[in-house]
């Protein structure tokens, strides 16, 4: 059965992009987007749709380990590439020399913290976007750890609903 989840997810993702573009660029031409679009709504909508799709994945999985493996394979490779590319972009975007950038402990703390989904520990790279209102190289990475927490909740919630359903049937 076909559905429109992909189209809705694309629309929500574009809403977030346009809202971030308007806020971060401060370009007057993009400001009207903020009157009609809500990044907060779009992110929450994206999480709701992800919840539906991830629950379907869990229900189709042969075991809890199978489900966990699918989630890791789905998220981590692209996430790791995103972090690595961000680090390399930071090397080009920094006002520091390449040698100085490479010798900064914060550059490696960025890689380690973000690889462990702890981007709040080091969201910035040395010499990159220091004068910006939001100096984080990729401030959207916080959503991945929320997504992972929700992945962990799915088996618990499905189990709870299965038990509640059984209890209701017995009464």
Image: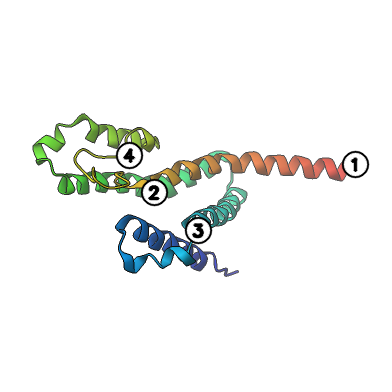
- Find residue 130 and name its label: none
Which residue is denoted by mark 4 in the rendering? 123
Q: Distance between the residues labelled 3 and 2?
A: 13 Å
Task: Name the residue carrying label 3.
Answer: 42
Q: Is residue 11 above or below residue 138?
A: below
The residue carrying pointer 2 sits among few (fewer than 14), some (14 to 19) or many (20 or more) residues within 10 Å by Cα, namely: few
Q: Is residue 78 above or below residue 101?
A: below
Check if mark 4's residue and mark 1's residue have beta carbons within 8 Å: no
The secondary structure type at the circle numbered 3 is helix
Q: Residue 144: percent from the left, percent from the top?
A: 44, 45
The first of marks 3 and 4 along the sequence is: 3
For the residues labelled 3 and 4, the Cα–Cα distance comes to 22 Å
Between the C-alphas of marks 2 and 1, the distance is 47 Å
Q: Quarter of the image for the N terminus: give it.
A: bottom right
Residue at the image point whose x is 38% and y is 36% from the top: 120
The tag earlier along the polypeptide, 2 or 1, is 2
Residue at the disc numbered 2: 140
- Residue that protrudes farthest toward the right in the picture: 171
User: Is 145 positioned to the left or the right of 45 in the image?
Assistant: left
């Amino acid at each position: 059965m076909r559905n429109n989840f992909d189209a809705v997810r694309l629309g929500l993702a574009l809403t977030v992009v346009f809202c971030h573009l308007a806020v971060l660029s401060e370009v007057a031409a993009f400001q009207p987007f903020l009157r009609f679009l809500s990044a907060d709504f779009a992110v929450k909508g994206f999480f709701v749709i992800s919840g539906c799709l991830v629950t379907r994945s869990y229900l189709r999985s042969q075991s809890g380990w199978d489900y966990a493996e699918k989630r890791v394979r789905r998220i981590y490779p692209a996430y790791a590439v995103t972090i690595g590319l961000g680090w390399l972009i930071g090397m080009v975007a920094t006002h520091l020399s390449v040698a100085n950038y490479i010798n900064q402990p914060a550059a490696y703390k960025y890689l380690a913290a973000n690889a462990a989904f702890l981007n709040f520990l080091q969201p910035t790279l040395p010499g990159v976007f220091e004068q910006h209102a939001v100096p984080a190289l990729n401030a959207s990475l916080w959503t991945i750890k929320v997504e992972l927490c929700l992945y962990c909740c799915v088996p618990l919630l499905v189990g709870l609903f299965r038990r509640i359903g059984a209890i209701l049937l017995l009464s």
